[in-house]
Image (cartoon, rainbow, N blue to C red):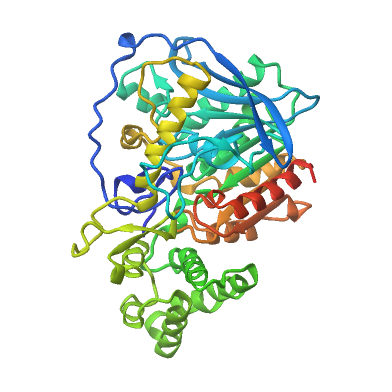
Amino acid sequence: MRHVLSCALLAALAAGTPALAFCADQPAKADTTAPADKAFHLPPLPADAHVTQTAQVDGRTLKYTVTVGSLPVRNGKGEVTGEVVYTAYTMPGKDRPVTFAVNGGPGASSVYLNFGAIGPKRVNFGVAGANPSDPATLHDNPGTWLGFTDLVFIDPIGTGFSRALVDDKEATKLFYSTDNDIKYLSRIVYDWLVKNGRMDSRKYLVGESYGGFRGPRMTDYLQTQLGVAMNGLVLVSPYLDPAASDDENVSPLPWMLTLPSIAAANLEREHKLTAEAMAPIVDYTRTTYATTLMQGRSNPAATAAMINKVTELTGLDPLFVKRSGGRIETQAYLREIYRAEGKLGSRYDSNVTAWDPFPTAPQQETGDPILNGIIAPTTTAMVNFVTKTVGWKIDARYNALSYQVNRLWHQDKDANRGSVNELRESVANDPGLRVLIAHGWDDLSCPFMASVLIVDQMPAMGDPTRVQVKEYPGGHMFYARPDSQRALRNDVEKLYGVK
């Protein structure tokens, strides 16, 4: 149940830690990847490459330029210590805003937001029925944001084709640590703006999962250190407060975060999932459920009533709920709910399942159904797009998810406090900044209830609608569902002032 800092890969590495563009607990999977060659063995990166494409969206033809390029990262002596590769989509037009996008991990490239959520093309992944071996065919993305903003997708060092030019020890210090990660990625945003003459453009940042951890910290650093003010911040399934899942033996909070998402999954299986159906569940969680857990054994009658209610909300076996004390541990739930079928649910969307290859093992012995299934299609689609379509010719491995980066990641001393302080400070510093926090109801890696509680505790600071939480059907990558993706885009258009 305990979540350590991370959201895009940690869940893929060890039970009891977060994961993928994401956050979560998941059984360990060995990393057999050999360390990359040292920088002086690497050929130089290609020059920036460009191609013109079109996409048909809502009856409109979007004609845009794709640029795949790189920006250097320098140390205090001016030496180049790393190279960040980005993919940019731009259209002609006066006063077009620009949006920078980062995913999570640590160790995830930006391909998930690019080819899944907001780029002009998309590939099928992360939904029920999607197989890793399906053709990785790109098609026009009806949910793209390109119609109202240029898009720049950033791959942190060690992900995508971005690379460190120092050894692992130095790379861990410079790139694979909580604080320096924020500093160099913020500088990449600054450098791209300068390189492309876009400092006067309206600027937005979108971060998914651990990218949602990065978002407020980057916004604060850009505001106060680099002199770049964001107009808006969109956090998709963000991992904002690692400490919220601590101390599950005493605090009710860890169990409060996941119960509504488990209940949402049950409602969806019954074809009853609506905002109206979720409202009383959220209310129960933050009132009766919380106080009953706090009372513990001092109130047996309240505990019995709570266990009956949790059984009703989750659809789980009453004996399982009773033995769990009404505290439903995520990985146990994902096995239990589908045990009779010999399947596992995904913590990124528990109604997406896969066969359990070790159904008699005492604990889950395989990776997450969604996490295991998304690497092949996204890698194939991105490599083909970059090297063939755009013509950025490179002879290197593309890391959609880097287990090595995740293994090397170093948490600085204040990492566990999350990004809530920076979120509050950024909103306080700039009365014009607006924030949208978007979640799928059925996400157990970065559950929506955490953001609901975080925002409800924020001071209003003039206009409380400047920071909003929105929930949609689906899981961590709820945007993989067309209706939820459409709803997200509608909400984002309001944030950008399009509607």
Q: Is residue 148 visible?
A: no
Comparing 224 with 380, the one in front is: 380
Residue at the farthest bottom position: 301
The residue that appears at 40% across and 79% down in the rendered structure is: 296
Q: Position of residue 129 (x, y in %)?
A: 42, 53
In this view, 327 is above or below 199: below
Q: Position of residue 292 (x, y in %)?
A: 47, 80
The residue that appears at 51% across and 25% down in the rendered structure is: 184
The quadrant of the picture occupied by the N terminus is bottom left
The residue that appears at 50% across and 61% down in the rendered structure is: 442
Comparing 64 with 3, the one in front is: 64
The residue that appears at 37% across and 83% down in the rendered structure is: 297
In this view, 302 is above or below 485: below
Q: Position of residue 494 (x, y in %)?
A: 75, 47
Q: Is residue 366 visible?
A: yes
| Residue 326 horizontal side relative to residue 284, left or right | left
Q: Write down the quadrant of residue 407 in the picture.
A: top left
Q: Position of residue 27 (x, y in %)?
A: 28, 52
Comparing 98 with 423, the one in front is: 98
Q: State the count of labels.
A: 0
| Residue 303 horizontal side relative to residue 101, left or right | left
Comparing 155 with 112, the one in front is: 112
| Residue 15 horizontal side relative to residue 460, left or right | left
